[in-house]
Amino acid sequence: MSTDIASIALPGGERIAKLGQGTWEMGERASRRADEIAALREGVALGMTLIDTAEMYGDGATEELVGEALQGLRDEVFLVSKVYPHNATHNASRRGVERACEASLARLGTDRIDLYLLHWRGGVPLEETVEGFEALVRAGKIRHWGVSNFDVDDMEELVALPGGAACAANQILYNVARRGPEFDLLPWSLARGMPVMAYSPVDHARLPKRSPLDDIAAGHGVSVWQVALAWVLRASGVCAIPKAARIEHVRENRAALDLKLGDADLAALDAYFKPPRSKRALEML
C-alpha cells in the first residue's frame, strides 16, 4: 500500500494529507494503549500524517498518548490540537489560549503544534481568541490556527476581525448522513481556499443498518465504512480524520482513499442521503 497519498492545501500553500487520523476516545483505557499507539504509528507509516487531538479528549490523556506515539516521528507529522472554550480557566481568552497551549505542548511532548483550533465558540469574544492565537504564532508555539464547529455566520464574523483572515481551517461534522454543510459552508470555504476537516466521517459508526452503502460495498468488495469514508474523501477541499484504534482498522481506512466511487454509486447515495436544498443548522458531536 502506497505511502504517497493525496493532499490538500492550506490557505498559505502548505499541503497536508487528505486522509488523517482522529483520536477521540483514545488514551482512556490502559488495556488499549499499546494497540492505539501501534495504530497511530502505522497510520504515519502509511502516509496518514495528519493527526488530530484536543485537550478535552480524556482530560488531556489523549494528548499524552499521541505524544508517546509520535516519539521519533514528530517531524513527519502535521499535528492538530484544540483549545477547550468552556472551563473555569477561560481557555479561549487572550491569556487563557496561551496557558492552554503550553499545557498541550507539555502533554504532547513537542515544542510546537502545527494547527491549533478553537474547539467551538464559547462566551469569550472571538477577537480575544484570535489575539491569543496570533501571539502563539509569533512565539513559534503554533504554526497555524483555525476553528472547529463554525457555521457560515461564525466564519464571516471571524474573518472580518483584525487578524481573522489568517484562519487556516474549519473542522466540522460532515459525512454522507449529515450533508448540511454542502448547502453553504462547503462552497463558502472552497471559494476562499480554506480546507474543511471532516470529523466523524463515518458518523461514529452510526450509519443506517441497511442502505445503498451495502450494495455499493458489495459491488466493490469493501466494507460499508470504506464506502462512506471514500464518499467524504471525494470532495474537493475536504480532508477526513477517522479514528482507528487498531492497525487493521488503520489499513482499512487507508485503502478507502484508493476507492473510486462511480457515477451510479454517487447517484444511489444522493437518492438515499439527499443533498440539502436549504440551510440547515451546523450539527456537532
Image (cartoon, grey):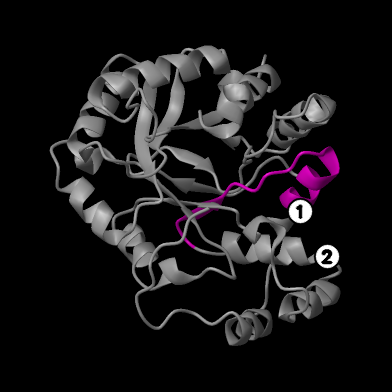
Q: Toward which corner of the image does residue 211 lie, by quadrant?
A: bottom right
Which residue lies at the image location 34% right of the left edge and 69% below the top edge?
184
Question: Which residues are drawn in magenta?
Answer: 236-254
**Mark 1 secondary-structure assignment:** helix
**Mark carried by residue 255:** 1
User: Which comes before the other along the chain, label 2 or label 1?
Assistant: 2
- How far across and how far down the image is residue 83, in percent? 41, 31
Residue lying at 64% horizontally and 41% vertically, measured from the top left = 21
Residue 30: mark? none
In the picture, the quarter occupied by the N terminus is top right
Residue lying furthest front = 88
Residue 177 in which image quadrant: bottom right
101, above or below 145, in the image: above
Q: Is residue 7 left or right of residue 13?
A: right
Residue 222 image label = 2
Q: Distance between the Cα atoms at labels 2 and 1?
A: 9 Å
Residue 58 to residue 138: above or below? below
Vertical side of 72 occupied by 44: above or below: below
Disc 2 crowd, CA 10 A, few/some/many (<14, 14-19, 20+): some
x and y, in percent, of residue 224 in the image: 77, 67
Is there CB contact under 8 Å for labels 2 and 1? yes
The answer to whether residue 141 of the structure is visible from this angle is no
Is 45 in the magenta?
A: no
